[in-house]
Amino acid sequence: MSRYLIAFVVAGFAFAAQAQPINERWLGRWQNGETILIVTGQNVINNGRVCRWVGKAPSGKFSGCVAYYGGSTSKQEMEGRLQEMRTSVKGAGMDAASLVQANKTLSELQTTLNTLSPDKYRYVATTDADDQGSGDCGSTYILDKENVYVVGNCESAGPEFALTVNAMQKVQAPATVAKLNGRWFSAQWKYGYELKDGVGTATATNSAKFKVGDEIIYLKPVLNNTFEGEQVYQDGKFHPVNVTLLPDGRLQFKGEKNISWTMSRQ
C-alpha cells in the first residue's frame, strides 16, 4: 500500500469519532464511466458490492462490506499532491510522447481541482472484510455542493496517476432495472420485498436476521432479461445471486450451492 494511501486511510480512522447517518445529499445513483456508486440511507453500493452504512470506520472484527465517513481531505491538500506528481513526472525519465501524455493528464486533474470549492471534504470510504490489505490502490468519494467525485490513489499506475479526481453524474437507473420495480414475494420461502431501481426493501421476512424495512437485495443488469447482484439470506448476510426474468413474469434466482427459487409479482 502506498504511503499516500496509508496516510489517507489512517487519517480517516482517526477522524471518525461516532456513527452518524450519511448526509442526504449523497443519496442517489452516481456514475463516471464504468464506476457506479449507489447511496441509500442504509447502504453504499460500490461497483456492485453492497456495503452497509456504519457511520465510522470499524475498530474491530467485522464481516462483509461496510461504508463510513473515513476522514477528510481538502482542495489545498490535493493541489499539494498534484505538485508532487508534477515533480515526479519530470524525474521519471519518460520519452517525449509519454511526457506529453502525462502532462496532459496532470493538466486535466488541475482543471478538475479548479472547479472544487476551497473547503474540507469528508470522504466516504468502503472496506470489505475479505479484501483488507490487498493491492496498493484505492478510491474514496467526496461531495462538493451537490456533486460527487471519485478520488483515486494509485502510485503503481504511474506518477501521473498517483491521484485522480473525477466528477460523477447523478443518473437514472437503466430501464432494464427499472422494469423490475414493484413488490415481489416467494411463496416457497415466505419472504418478499419491494424493488425500486435495483434495490429491494423487505416487505415480509422469514428470519430474525433481517426485518421489514431493511434493504436486502441489489440487482444490476447483465443482459436484457438477466441480472446479477447480492441478496440477504436467512443468515442475515449478503450472498451473490444470478437472476433471470422468465417469460411468465416471474424472477428465477440461482444462488450459491446451486440453490434455486422464484419470486412472483404481488
Image: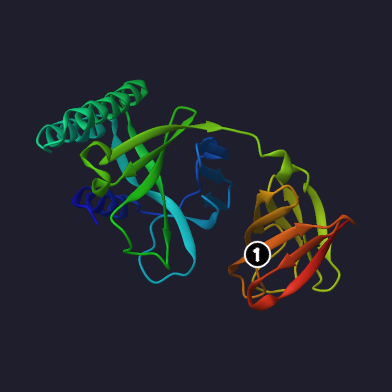
Give the residue displayed 44% in from the left and 69% down from the top. Answer: 62
- Secondary structure beneath label 1: strand
Kindly indicate the quadrant of the structure image that contains residue 56: bottom left
Q: Write down the residue under mark 1.
A: 241
**Side of 260 relative to 124 (left or right):** right
Compared to 201, does 59 lie above or below? below
- Expressed as whole percent of the image width and height from the top left, the position of residue 43 reads 56, 53
Residue type at numbered disc 1: Val
Residue 50 shown left or right of residue 94 in the figure? right
Residue 170: image location, x then y, percent: 56, 32
Measuring 23% from the left and 34% from the top, which residue is drawn there? 77
Residue at horizontal 58 percent and vertical 48 percent from the top: 41
From what the image shows, is residue 189 above or below residue 83?
Answer: below
In the image: residue 90, left or right of residue 184: left
Q: Quadrant of the N terminus?
A: bottom left
Front residue of 175/101: it is 101
In the rendered image, the quadrant that contains the C terminus is: bottom right
Q: Hey, which quadrant is residue 235 in on the image?
A: bottom right
Judge by depth and name the residue closer to the eye, 113 or 66: 113
Q: Is residue 191 toward the left or the right of residue 143 in the image?
A: right
